[in-house]
Amino acid sequence: MNEYQLWTALNGGLTQNALFQAGTFFLLWVAFRAANQIRIEDSGVLNKTLVSLFSLGIIFNGLTLGAAFLSILESTAYGFDELEVISAGAQNFVETFGTGSVSFDAGPFSNPINTGWWAVITVMLFGRIWTKA
């Protein structure tokens, strides 16, 4: 691979990740709407459980997309580092995102900022679903 191909692959990966993230945020909006409806109607345990499971699926998907995002960046930096000659922009990219060996077994909790953000979302959703008004 050459530098241009790596930049192109990075662009494709980031575009795909952004599309999946937009879908995840739409489903997150649906989950908050469902949580609000659960609270308004004072629904039973079955409905609360189903909305909770739906919300957990969205949260896990968001965590996974955050890990994939970091993997895309780190893989591209590793690819640049493997090339013999790279531009100044690619060198800056390598310095920013590291040159360690790429680990594809990084789980959804590998990014602490992403994990913290989704933890807040979890508390907000479950607080809305399971507490009284």
Image (spheres, rainbow, N blue to C red):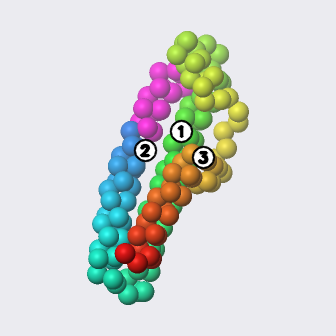
Residue 46 is situated, as x and y percent measured from the top left of the image, at 41, 86
Residue 80 lies, with reference to residue 72, above or below; the image says above
SS category of the residue bearing label 1: helix
Q: In this rendering, would 34 be left or right of 1?
A: left
State the residue position of label 3: 111
Magenta stretch in the rendered image: 1-14
Question: What residue sits 59% from the left and 17% below the top?
Answer: 91
Of callouts 1 and 2, the N-terminal one: 2
Residue 117 lies, with reference to residue 42, above or below; the image says above
Residue 91 lies, with reference to residue 75, above or below; the image says above
State the residue position of label 2: 17
Report how far apart the C-alphas of labels 1 and 3 lie in the structure. 13 Å
* Residue 116 in sight in this render: yes
The amino acid type found where label 3 is placed reads Asn
Report the quarter where the N terminus lies.
top right
Report the quarter where the C terminus lies.
bottom left
Tell how many labels: 3
The amino acid type found where label 2 is placed reads Asn
Q: Residues within 10 Å of mark 3 (few under 14, many from 20)?
A: some
Contact (Cβ within 8 Å) of mark 1 with mark 2: yes
Report how far apart the C-alphas of labels 1 and 2 lie in the structure. 9 Å
Residue 129 is situated, as x and y percent measured from the top left of the image, at 41, 74
**In the image, residue 3 lies in the stretch drawn in magenta:** yes
Give the label on residue 72, or none: 1
Q: Quadrant of residue 96?
A: top right
